[in-house]
Image (cartoon, rainbow, N blue to C red):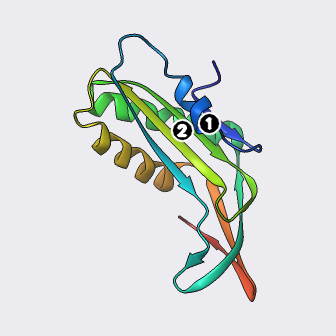
Amino acid sequence: MGKLFEIVQDPISVDEVVSRLANPAIGAVVTFVGTVRGDTDGRRVLYLEYEAYPEMAEQVLAQVGDEVRARWTEVQQVAIAHRVGRLDIGDVAVVIALSAAHRKQTFDALRYAIDRIKEIVPIWKKEVWADGAEWKSD
């Protein structure tokens, strides 16, 4: 079983992240898979570059997991993997997986997790276009 919260440079396997939550008591696993899209506000994106302070980012990802479990007590476990480095169109940037005995409210918890990651985790994204580049906060 891999770490529940990690910053990685290699491609992320959704199945591998989900497998970290294996437990006979769970009946539901919900996931969010964030991929690199090829267009932002009408501009063609060539690729993204993500940077992070890995040790701190992993601690804050764990904090997000703790917040989710505190607010949605039926959520048993959370696993989050975020990729850094150059990502091409279609690459997986982030995977969030939540497990629970039942699916009730897990989708709300998942939405909260991705929003909190964008708000507080020290990960930075640079969008690169044919005519320039810009660091973005989300």
Between 84 and 28, the residue placed more toward the observer is 28
- Point 49% across, 40% down: residue: 96
Between 116 and 27, the residue placed more toward the observer is 27
Q: Position of residue 120 (x, y in %)?
A: 50, 50
Mark 1 Cα-neighbour bin, 10 Å: few <14, some 14–19, many ≥20: many
Q: Identify the residue under disc 2.
A: 61
88 over 4 or under it: above or below: below
- Point 36% across, 49% down: residue: 111
Which mark identifies residue 92? none
67 over 47 or under it: above or below: above
Spatial CA distance of label 1 from label 2 is 5 Å
Q: Residue furthest left?
A: 104
Q: Residue furthest bottom?
A: 131
Residue 122 visible to the viewer: no
Q: Secondary structure at mark 2?
A: helix
Mark 2 Cα-neighbour bin, 10 Å: few <14, some 14–19, many ≥20: many
Q: Position of residue 94 (x, y in %)?
A: 58, 48
Splitting the image into 4 quarters, where does residue 73 fall? top left
- Point 29% across, 20% down: residue: 101
Q: Position of residue 58 (x, y in %)?
A: 62, 36
Q: Secondary structure at mark 1?
A: helix
Q: Are marks 1 and 2 in contact (CB under 8 Å)?
A: yes
Residue 134 visible to the viewer: yes
Q: Position of residue 50 (x, y in %)?
A: 70, 58
Q: Identify the residue under disc 1.
A: 58
The amino acid type found where label 1 is placed reads Glu
- For the N terminus, give its image quadrant: top right
The amino acid type found where label 2 is placed reads Leu
Splitting the image into 4 quarters, where does residue 24 fall? top left
